Image: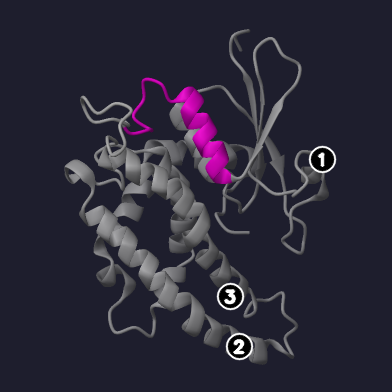
Amino acid sequence: MSQDTPKVVLHWLNGSRALATTWLLEELEIPYELDIHHRLPNAMAPPELEELHILGKSPVLSITPPGSSERIVLAESAFITQYLSDHFATGKTLVPTRWKDGQEGRVGGETESWMRYQYLLYYIEGSFMATMVHNVIFTGLKGPRIPFFIRPFTRLLANQLIAMLVIPNMKRHFALLERYLATSPDGGSYICGINLTSADILLSFRLLAFDEAGAFEEMWAWEKTPFKESYPKLQAYMELLSNEPGWKRALEKVTKIEGSCPLLP
């Protein structure tokens, strides 16, 4: 590693959004190390992550600037994504061009691609992720961690909560993503236009994890139209992301260390 290159360490936890950060680091082509952590039997993160950040969650990224012995510790996926993109994406297309020609610095002078990109960084980790997490929690009430003698009752409750709270909100989010993909700038296949951006990478993990687990089809089992037919552009988009070379490299890197790389804990 060059003396002019920062030391970057991703503190990685299985079944977490750290995999999307791994992909981003692959796309940025900067040297980095993986510090591997494993969930406890109750699926919680191990306590040693609290030594890095008080919330004890992953991803956490530490960066030691050249010539310094003090490391910068970053937490929260969107902040990590924006920080890395701001500092290391020069010369790449991971961040859309901000200004229209001749509109530099003017209110309303931003390109549509950049406005989408900025909105999505907040939306993905805000409104969208909240609904996805609700589904994970409610689905857990039907799983093997619930004592078998009360599982029939928690399963009934979970199904009702998912039907009342999760699916109606999921439909709104998927309709938004479907519309964004249908109106992608310059007819692009990615969500901000013709190029893969850091926003696509940030969005990737939860979409691909749920798709791999069959969660979307399961949630849509009682709908008249299957998920793939309801949101064809979103389905094609997930297939596009899953075939990205950077995503595959991230999976391979973790698999080489861990022996496998399941997306969900």
Hey, what amino acid is under mark 2?
Leu
Label 1 close to label 2 by CB (< 8 Å)? no
Label at residue 174? none
Q: Secondary structure at mark 3?
A: helix
Q: Secondary structure at mark 2?
A: helix
- The residue that appears at 64% across and 38% down in the rendered structure is 257
Residue at image mark 2: 157
Left or right? Give the position of 75 relative to 167. right
Task: Tell me which segment is drawn in magenta.
Answer: 77-96
Residue at image mark 1: 51
225 magenta-colored: no
- The residue that appears at 29% across and 26% down in the rendered structure is 104
Residue sitting nearer the eye, 43 or 101:
101
Hey, what amino acid is under mark 3?
Thr
Report x, y in % for residue 227.
Answer: 33, 72
Report x, y in % for residue 10.
Answer: 64, 35
Residue sitting nearer the eye, 204 or 256:
204
Residue at image mark 3: 139
Left or right? Give the position of 42 relative to 211. right
Left or right? Give the position of 203 relative to 50. left
Hey, what amino acid is under mark 1?
Glu
Q: Residues within 10 Å of mark 2 (few under 14, many from 20)?
A: some
Q: Residues within 10 Å of mark 1 (few under 14, many from 20)?
A: few
